[in-house]
Image: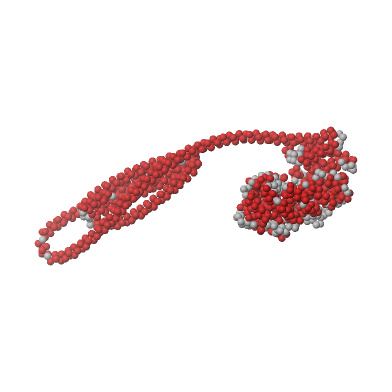
């Protein structure tokens, strides 16, 4: 750094601080901002724009990379970072919402009771650091939805951590959570109300009490007490928690932390700094929160009375005054300035004590010298402290500026303060926009410097120094530039613009004008300048200030001073009135524009209100029509459901009857098959007996042939008789050939019957094809009704019940299929047994004799079977008609309800398959009955009694 040169004949006032080191580590905390070199004017606004730009990028796309970039940028904070919320209020609130949502997202990735992974821990610490930095000086009001969820998460996490004893393990995240919550409660009454209205607020109080009783860590103690003080200090619970005994312990803790003598915690020593986050590595955060705790406790009158008698308050103030000097540590200076500002604000008694200490030990010039600190933030807060100490009552300060020695000590400092004003004039002249000017560090600091010089000019010796040092040209240039801004700005922008620096410079110049030692030429020139239109415009702008009451009061007093110090009051008042009128007219234009905009907006609102009312009426009518339509559809659905249930019940009854009928027939067939098996067993045994007898006859025949050789002679005698026997045998053979022809004719008739059966089966298949074509047509018709399906979407809930009924039907159909599979397996066994019986029948056919009676019996049985088949055909036609009628009913129901159509089609398909299976079983039963009749006929062997029995069985089957 280069030393500042003398200005205006004044000797060098600033020396390089050899012991002062300003590094990132010294200023890396949110309570203290960082220094910027005095010659880096061009980068100040750029830094603010970078912060705003990065904040906008992070709001648009919040991720870990953008968070880290924003975090690193805010580590090098300046006065603009501190005033970020004031200059970008909307962006700051939006950024807080996004940070809160990001923190909640990171918190959801961790299960309850589990520790954060290292990457997530770093990300969470960065989020909590930013959530502590940006809410400072931000008027949040009542929390948004996202901030409300963040506050709920903070309260819940603090309670859970307190219950599991996180304070014993020096939980960094818990400390940051307490710090964020304490900062949000500081100036936001809406946040306090929101937290007090939480359902678990009592558990939160209990958790903070557990933290206070379970640890000696100063950070946990101070943060918890600050939160409790800001929530319940004035309540009945606060009277219990902050009793006189507890307040004494709290004050002892506060001053121990400020003195650096508290050794009860593990996280406050230097060895613990490596384990903590950036924000918690510095004791200045803890010390500033301790000072805030002192300020919060002083809100109660009984505690404030005790503080007035508490000796350490004044002793610590004297110590802090000694800390504030140009070569001091930046963090210690910040803490000392913060403490002195709080103490001076507690009451006149404390302010008087601080001023007395400054007067006795001659420390005011060292305190004033810090305003020239390279760190603009430290200079800014020190200037604020001096303005607060000086106040409006100058009587206690007279002892500070009575001796010429003290005045000589202040000479270089006064020159440095005017040099700051000169630098500010350069910034004002080089600024490209009003926004850039308002966010400049030099400009903001110069406002406080001009106020400070104005107050110091109340003392004659200091005023004489100021007269010797002031540069009228540079101060006049500031007033002229800002006056031109007032005349050139848009009326709407003028509502938010105040030439604060020019106003205070005018007040400073007015104070200097009263000094008798000023050169007459300079006095006349200054007096003429103060009567110029630029000064009148600046004072008119101050007169219309709507936010700073003290500024308006100072302006009115200045008007009074001007008018009382001149002989021609009317002329001077007219010049001042011109400036007031000019600013008033510009503001009036802005108000008229605003009123026109508001009027147009109100007209638009009225038009939109009418449109909304009309839409609400239409919506109510549509809702009423929709309710009526829904009720009507519900009634129709109930009717259709009732009809469908009745039809389904009828079908189930018919299917049950058919099932019972076939069960009876199957049991009868099983009984007949068993009786036939027994009969066939008897027949086989009889045939075996006959074969044995035939073999015996053959043996006897051989014996007879032997005897015949011996009786040849007797044969010759009997030749005539043998010829007669041969003639009779030929006649019998002819009869056998005739009977063979008759058997062949019977076989041809059987083939014809089989052909008729095949043709009838083809007709049935053609009928099935016709049914399939009809189903195809029904499917095509259903596709044409898909447009109505969209209108019946609201009936989907009712269809779900039908879907459940459909599932029950599927289960019943599966049961029927299982029964049919059992019947098929039984049929296969019967067919195998019948095949075996067919082989026996083929053996019996070679030995059949007297087939005429058997063929007649077969013909009668065949007629019976034809009659049964015709009856089954009629039954099938009736079932088919019922099926077609059911399909027509289903088609009508599909027009009303597309979802019901699908269910009905599936059930009709199941019924059709059941009918096909029934017809298949009927055909198989007919075949079995025919075979059984044929077996009975063939097994009778020509016996009349057996033939009668076979015919009777055939008719029964």
Q: Quadrant of residue 508?
A: top right
Whether residue 550 is visible here, answered yes or no, is yes
- Horizontal relation, residue 500 to residue 935: left or right: right
Residue 781 seen anywhere in this rendered image of the structure: no
Image quadrant containing the N terminus: bottom right
Q: Toward the viewer: 351 or 854? A: 351
Res 639 → quadrant:
top left
Describe the colour scheme in one phrase.
secondary structure
Front-lying residue, 938 or 637: 637
Q: Is residue 362 left or right of residue 305?
A: right
Q: Is residue 874 left or right of residue 517?
A: left
Q: Residue 901 at x, y = what percent?
A: 44, 43
Q: Residue at x 29, y 53 (%)?
A: 672
| Total numbered labels placed on residues in the image | 0
878 to 327, vertically: above or below:
above
The single residue placed furthest to the left in the displayed view is 717
Residue 741 at x, y percent in the picture = 22, 52
Frontmost residue, 301 versus 869: 301
Residue furthest toward the top?
A: 570
Q: Residue at x 27, y 57 (%)?
A: 678
Percent position of residue 196, x then y: 65, 47
Based on the displayed image, in which of its 4 quarters is residue 831 positioned? bottom left
The spot of residue 842 in percent (x, y) is 26, 56
The answer to whether residue 872 is above or below residue 721 is above
């Amino acid at each position: 750094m280069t030393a500042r040169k003398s200005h205006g004949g004044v000797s060098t006032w600033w020396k390089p601080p050899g012991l002062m080191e300003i590094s990132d580590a010294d200023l890396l905390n949110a309570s203290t901002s960082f220094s910027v070199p005095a010659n880096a004017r061009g980068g100040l606004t750029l830094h603010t724009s970078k912060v705003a730009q990065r904040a906008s990028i992070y709001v648009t796309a919040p991720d870990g990379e953008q968070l880290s970039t924003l975090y690193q940028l805010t580590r090098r904070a300046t006065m603009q970072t501190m005033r970020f919320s004031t200059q970008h209020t909307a962006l700051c609130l939006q950024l807080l919402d996004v940070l809160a949502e990001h923190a909640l997202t990171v918190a959801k990735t961790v299960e309850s009771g589990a520790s954060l992974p290292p990457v997530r821990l770093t990300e969470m610490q960065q989020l909590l650091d930013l959530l502590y930095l940006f809410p400072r000086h931000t008027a949040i009001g009542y929390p948004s939805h996202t901030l409300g969820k963040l506050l709920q998460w903070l309260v819940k996490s603090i309670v859970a951590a307190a219950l599991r004893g996180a304070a014993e393990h020096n939980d960094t995240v818990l400390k940051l959570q307490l710090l964020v919550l304490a900062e949000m409660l500081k100036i936001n009454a809406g946040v306090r109300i929101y937290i007090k209205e939480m359902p678990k607020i009592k558990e939160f109080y209990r958790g903070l009490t557990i933290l206070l009783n379970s640890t000696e860590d100063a950070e946990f103690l101070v943060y918890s007490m600050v939160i409790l003080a800001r929530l319940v200090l004035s309540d009945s619970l606060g009277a219990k928690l902050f009793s006189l005994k507890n307040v004494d312990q709290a004050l002892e803790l506060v001053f121990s932390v400020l003195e650096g003598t508290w050794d009860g915690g593990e996280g406050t020593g230097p060895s613990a700094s490596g384990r903590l986050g950036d924000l918690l590595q510095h004791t200045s955060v803890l010390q500033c929160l301790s000072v805030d705790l002192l300020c919060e406790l002083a809100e109660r009158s009984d505690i404030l009375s005790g503080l007035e008698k508490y000796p350490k308050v004044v002793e610590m103030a004297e110590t802090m005054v000694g800390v504030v000097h140009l070569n001091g540590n930046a963090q210690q200076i910040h803490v000392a300035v913060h403490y002195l500002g709080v103490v001076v604000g507690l009451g006149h008694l404390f302010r008087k004590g601080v001023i007395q200490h400054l007067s006795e030990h001659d420390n005011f010039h060292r305190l004033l010298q810090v305003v020239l600190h390279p760190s603009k933030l430290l200079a800014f807060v020190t200037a604020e402290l001096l303005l607060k100490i000086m106040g409006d009552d100058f009587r206690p300060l007279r002892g500070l500026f009575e001796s010429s020695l003290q005045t000589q000590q202040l000479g270089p400092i006064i020159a440095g303060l005017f040099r700051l004003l000169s630098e500010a004039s350069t910034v004002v002249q080089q600024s490209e926009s009003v926004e850039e000017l308002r966010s400049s560090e030099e400009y903001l600091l110069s406002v406080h410097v001009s106020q400070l010089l104005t107050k110091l000019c109340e003392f004659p010796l200091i005023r004489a120094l100021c007269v010797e040092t002031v540069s009228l040209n540079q101060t006049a240039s500031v007033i002229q530039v800002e006056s031109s801004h007032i005349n050139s700005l848009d009326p709407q922008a003028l509502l938010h613009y105040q030439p604060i620096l020019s106003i205070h410079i005018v007040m400073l110049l007015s104070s200097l004008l009263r000094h008798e030692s000023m050169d007459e030429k300079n006095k006349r020139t200054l007096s003429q300048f103060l009567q110029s239109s630029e000064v009148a415009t600046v004072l008119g702008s101050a007169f219309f200030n709507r936010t700073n009451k003290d500024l308006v009061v100072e302006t009115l007093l200045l008007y009074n001073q001007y008018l009382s110090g001149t002989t021609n009051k009317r002329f001077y008042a007219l010049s001042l009135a011109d400036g007031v009128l000019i600013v008033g007219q510009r503001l009036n234009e802005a108000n008229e524009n605003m009123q026109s905009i508001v009027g147009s907006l109100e007209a638009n609102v009225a038009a939109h209100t009418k449109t909304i009312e009309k839409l609400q009426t239409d919506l109510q009518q549509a809702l009423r029509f929709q309710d009526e339509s829904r009720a009507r559809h519900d009634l129709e659905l109930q009717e259709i459901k009732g009809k469908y249930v009745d039809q389904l019940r009828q079908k189930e009854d018919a299917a049950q009857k058919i099932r019972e009928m076939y069960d009876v027939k199957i049991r009868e067939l099983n009984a007949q098959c068993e009786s036939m098996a027994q009969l066939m067993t008897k027949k086989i045994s009889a045939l075996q007996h006959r074969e044995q007898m035939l073999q015996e006859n053959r043996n006897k025949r051989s014996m007879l042939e032997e005897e015949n050789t011996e009786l040849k002679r007797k044969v010759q005698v009997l030749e005539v008789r043998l010829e007669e026997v041969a003639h009779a045998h030929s006649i019998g053979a002819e009869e056998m050939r005739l009977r063979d022809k008759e058997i062949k004719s019977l076989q041809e008739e059987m083939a014809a019957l089989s052909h008729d059966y095949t043709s009838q089966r083809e007709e049935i298949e053609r009928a099935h094809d016709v049914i399939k074509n009809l189903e195809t047509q029904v499917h095509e018709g259903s596709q044409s009704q898909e447009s109505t399906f969209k209108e019946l979407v609201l009936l989907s809930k009712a269809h779900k019940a039908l879907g459940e009924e459909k599932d029950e039907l599927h289960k019943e159909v599966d049961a029927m299929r299982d029964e049919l599979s059992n019947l098929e397996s039984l049929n296969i066994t019967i067919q195998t047994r019948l095949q075996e019986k067919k082989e026996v029948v083929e053996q019996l056919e070679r030995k059949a004799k007297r087939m005429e009676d058997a063929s007649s019996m077969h013909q009668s049985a065949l007629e019976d079977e034809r009659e049964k088949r015709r009856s089954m055909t009629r039954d099938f036609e009736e079932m088919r008609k019922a099926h077609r009628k059911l399909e027509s009913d289903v088609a009508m129901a599909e027009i009303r309800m597309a979802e019901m159509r699908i269910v009905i089609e599936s059930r009709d398909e199941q019924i059709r398959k059941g009918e096909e299976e029934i017809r298949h079983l009927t055909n198989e039963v007919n075949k079995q009955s025919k075979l059984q009749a044929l077996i009975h006929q063939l097994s009778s062997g020509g016996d009349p009694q057996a033939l009668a029995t076979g015919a009777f069985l055939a008719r029964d089957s």
